Image (cartoon, rainbow, N blue to C red):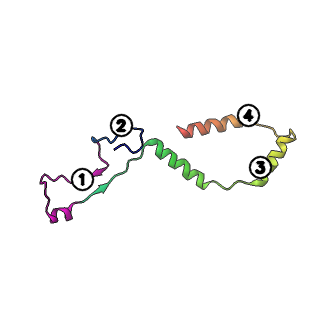
């Protein structure tokens, strides 16, 4: 069954659920009661990275509207000075954290 039209369908070679092997085509009621199913979830490295970034974002403080307005006004008046070395350093730090 193809539910997302991005793949060729279900890959029967891998299972997302560990199912007990039962060679008897008609299992007894007792066997059905004792069957244990376990679900497994495996996250990719990129998914783990996204979860880490999301956690860091949740910990960040809310936007300080007064600071935003102060900087916006300084930019409009041509008074805002950019420290290009500091900016480049922050960009490199950010890039390192993504990798």
Of helix, strand and loop, which one carries label 1? loop
Q: Nearer the viewer, mark 1 or mark 4?
A: 1
* Residue 84 circle label: 4
> Disc 1 to disc 4, how far (Cα)?
59 Å
Q: Depth check: 89 or 20 in front?
A: 20
Query: In the picture shown, does residue 32 fall above or below 63?
Result: below
> Disc 2 to disc 3, how far (Cα)?
49 Å
| Residue drawn where x is 76% and y is 54% of the image | 65
Residue 17 in the figure: left or right of residue 86: left
Of helix, strand and loop, which one carries label 3? helix
Residue range (magenta): 14-35
Of helix, strand and loop, which one carries label 2? loop
| Residue drawn where x is 16% and y is 65% of the image | 29
Query: In the picture shown, does residue 88 fall above or below 63?
Result: above
Which residue is identified by label 3? 68
Which residue is identified by label 1? 19
Q: Depth check: 8 or 18 in front?
A: 8
Q: Depth check: 56 or 30 in front?
A: 30
Q: Is label 3 in contact with label 4 (beta carbons under 8 Å)?
A: no
Marks 3 and 1, the one that precedes in the sequence:
1
Counting from the top left corner in percent of width and height, residue 93 is at 61, 38
* Residue 8 circle label: 2
Q: Residues within 10 Å of mark 4 (few under 14, many from 20)?
A: few
Marks 1 and 2, the one that precedes in the sequence:
2
């Amino acid at each position: 069954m193809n539910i997302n039209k991005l793949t060729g369908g279900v890959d029967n070679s891998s299972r997302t659920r560990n199912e007990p092997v039962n060679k008897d085509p008609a299992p007894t009621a007792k066997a059905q009661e004792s069957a244990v199913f376990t679900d497994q979830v495996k996250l990719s490295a990129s998914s783990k990275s996204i979860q880490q970034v999301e956690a860091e974002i949740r910990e960040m403080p809310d936007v300080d509207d007064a600071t935003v307005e102060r900087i916006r006004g300084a930019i409009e008046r041509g008074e805002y000075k950019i420290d290009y070395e500091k900016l480049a350093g922050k960009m490199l730090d950010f890039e390192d954290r993504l990798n």
